[in-house]
């Protein structure tokens, strides 16, 4: 082995060591980047799951809260006994748990300007409960607006909105029975209720 070869050999080892060290560093960087990416995906999945659970809770309340259920039943049914929410039973003498549903009484109770019969227990129950119902729809509208939930996550929402848009036992083809009430007390809710059907149909 010549003198020049003896000089070059350590240089070759050093270069190879540097190359391997560089590859090791690059591999470490790639691994770290991959772990960051996996962590980000896991965080996104976790956030999506939380949003989905939150959305499910919003919709479930429409079928579990006694005031909200009272309203959806009143919209769904043409006649029949309605279960009075617990906190309004004291309005009735003697306290009772049901009263006979009347579409005309419901419409009268939800006029923007109350008539002479507004103090009857039935009228007060309709009005108090629908006030809660429309307030809750405003809450859902707010969560959509600030993107706490996505429209697609609110499975079943359109059913409830359709009951308001197209109440099956009321004449809504010419003058909608709820619009004066909504426009006076919930001015932003009309656009939300009717805009959602446009989003659903893509029109």
Image: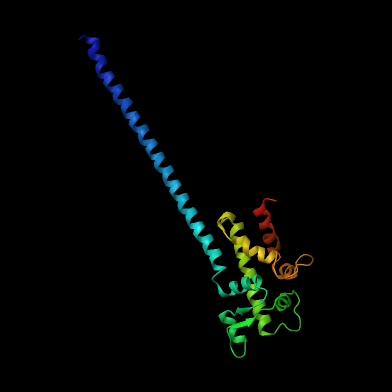
In this view, the residue farthest toward the top is 2
Tell me: residue 12, above or below residue 136: above
The location of residue 191, given as percent across then percent down, is: 70, 60
Task: Identify the residue shown where x is 31% and y is 22%.
Answer: 15
148 relative to 28 in the view: left or right: right
Task: Identify the residue shown where x is 66% and y is 82%.
Answer: 122
Q: What's the coloring here? A: rainbow
In this view, the residue farthest toward the right is 174
Residue 70: quarter of image: bottom right
Q: Nearer the viewer, residue 151 or 171?
A: 171
Quadrant assignment for the N terminus: top left
Q: Is residue 45 visible?
A: yes
100 relative to 4 in the view: left or right: right
In this view, the residue farthest toward the bottom is 94
The location of residue 134, given as percent across then percent down, is: 65, 69
Tell me: residue 166, above or below residue 35: below
Residue 179: quarter of image: bottom right
Task: Identify the residue shown where x is 63% and y is 82%.
Answer: 99
């Amino acid at each position: 082995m010549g003198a020049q070869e003896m000089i070059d050999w350590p240089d070759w080892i050093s270069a190879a060591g540097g190359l391997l060290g560089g590859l090791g560093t690059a591999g470490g960087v790639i691994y770290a980047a991959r772990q960051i990416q996996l962590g980000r995906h896991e965080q996104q999945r976790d956030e999506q799951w939380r949003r989905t659970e939150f959305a499910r809770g919003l919709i479930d309340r429409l079928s579990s809260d006694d005031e909200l259920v009272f309203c959806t039943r009143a919209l769904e049914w043409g006649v029949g006994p309605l279960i009075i929410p617990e906190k309004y039973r004291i309005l009735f003498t003697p306290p009772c748990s049901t009263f006979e549903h009347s579409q005309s009484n419901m419409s009268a109770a939800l006029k923007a300007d109350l008539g002479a019969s507004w103090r009857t227990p039935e009228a007060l129950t309709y009005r108090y409960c629908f006030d809660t119902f429309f307030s809750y729809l405003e809450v859902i509208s707010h969560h959509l607006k600030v993107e706490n939930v996505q429209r697609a996550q609110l499975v079943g929402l359109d059913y409830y909105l359709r009951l308001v848009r197209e109440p099956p036992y009321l004449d809504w083809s010419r003058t909608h029975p709820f619009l004066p009430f909504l426009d006076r007390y919930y001015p932003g809710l009309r656009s939300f209720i009717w805009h959602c059907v446009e989003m659903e149909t893509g029109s």
